[in-house]
Amino acid sequence: MTTRIAAFYLFFPFPTYEAAREPLRATLEAAGVKGTVLLAAEGVNGTIAASPEGIDTALAALRALPGAEALEAKFSEADENPFLRLKVRLKQEIVTMGVPGTDPKALVGTYVTPEEWNALISDPDTVLIDTRNDYEYAIGTFEGAIDPETKTFREFPDWFRDFREKLEAEGRKPKIAMFCTGGIRCEKATSFVKAEGIDDVFHLQGGILKYLEEVPEENSLWRGECFVFDERVSVKHDLTPGDYDMCHACKRPITEEDKQGNAYVPGVSCPHCIDEMSAEQKRRFAERQKQINLARKRGEAHMGPDAAAVAARRREEALEAQEAAREDAGTEDA
């Protein structure tokens, strides 16, 4: 059965978010939903997967939250559920920027639809900024986009303040256009940038995923693949899974070429993270991978008629490794 994946977010006043957690979790669990939902006083954010009926139930429950009636989702499909379990988490922010007072409900940039985006970013008076992390930019971005070279979204405010000083030193006051995967980071980024006194600020409504869904590939200014924070790793222009694999240690995308080098040790390191991990992290990752391999061997020894169950267990073990590594390495991004 095809699995439906829904990515969503909405900024809205949500003072009762703590009390909403358990009822929402119970509804989603009963519908067979897996993935992550973040709740905060500023709204909701998440990516979930289930049967089409399960996703319909989940979105209905989310839209029933007071103030969330306008919540929209972007959809894609997969042969299997890309998530291991359901997590409904309470957070200070639904996407972490770390600048108190940044409020997209009160101040935000101008939304630009995917159909209008090409004209905006082709204008020589527009500066196009990719608000995602450096490893996301590396595998795909819009033609002409600036890479802030940030490792987390928390680094964006300091980067932009430095960038603005350079623009002012050059006497430039361009239009600022920003984008991200689903729209949430650039929505918060435009709020921050406008609060800094920049007036002509724009962002891609629905993010890259909506653009790839709606703009024909022959008219597209997108180059490469789009990184996504689940087992698919990346998606192509038609939103089908891309060509990248995942380093289960640092959660970054890797190519087949990366996996041929000495820096790549499955579950332990890759060329991107081998010099970043401490000896203790590498030891812990190596032990975890050893246990995964042992479990797989035990499964192979008892395959019999239950091969599908063993295959499912293997996949869950790999996803466990991804999630643990993501938290250990501090690379999880809402």
Image (cartoon, rainbow, N blue to C red):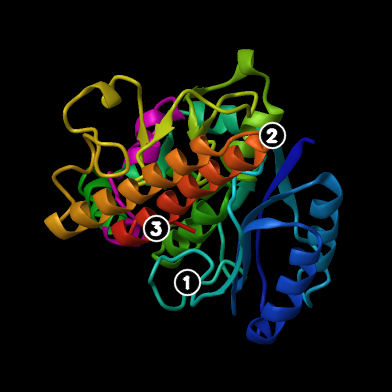
**Residue closer to the observer: 19 or 181:** 19
**Residue closer to the observer: 173 or 196:** 196
Residue positioned 27% across, 46% down in the render: 167
**Residue closer to the observer: 54 or 94:** 54
What secondary structure is marked by label 2?
A: loop
Which residue bears the numbered disc 1? 102
Q: Is residue 145 above or below residue 327?
A: above
Residue 85: x and y in percent read: 61, 58
Locate residue 3 relative to residue 151 in the image: left or right: right
Quarter-of-image position of residue 312: top right
Residue 281 is covered by the magenta coloring: no
Residue 24: x and y in percent read: 74, 73
Three-letter amino acid code of the residue under disc 2? Pro
Residue positioned 39% across, 29% down in the render: 139
User: What is the span of residues highlighted in magenta in the rendered image?
Assistant: 135-158
Which residue bears the numbered disc 2? 305
- Mark carried by residue 324: 3
What secondary structure is marked by label 3?
A: helix
Three-letter amino acid code of the residue under disc 3? Ala
Q: Is residue 270 above or below residue 198?
A: above
Quarter-of-image position of residue 127: top left
Residue 67: x and y in percent read: 77, 74
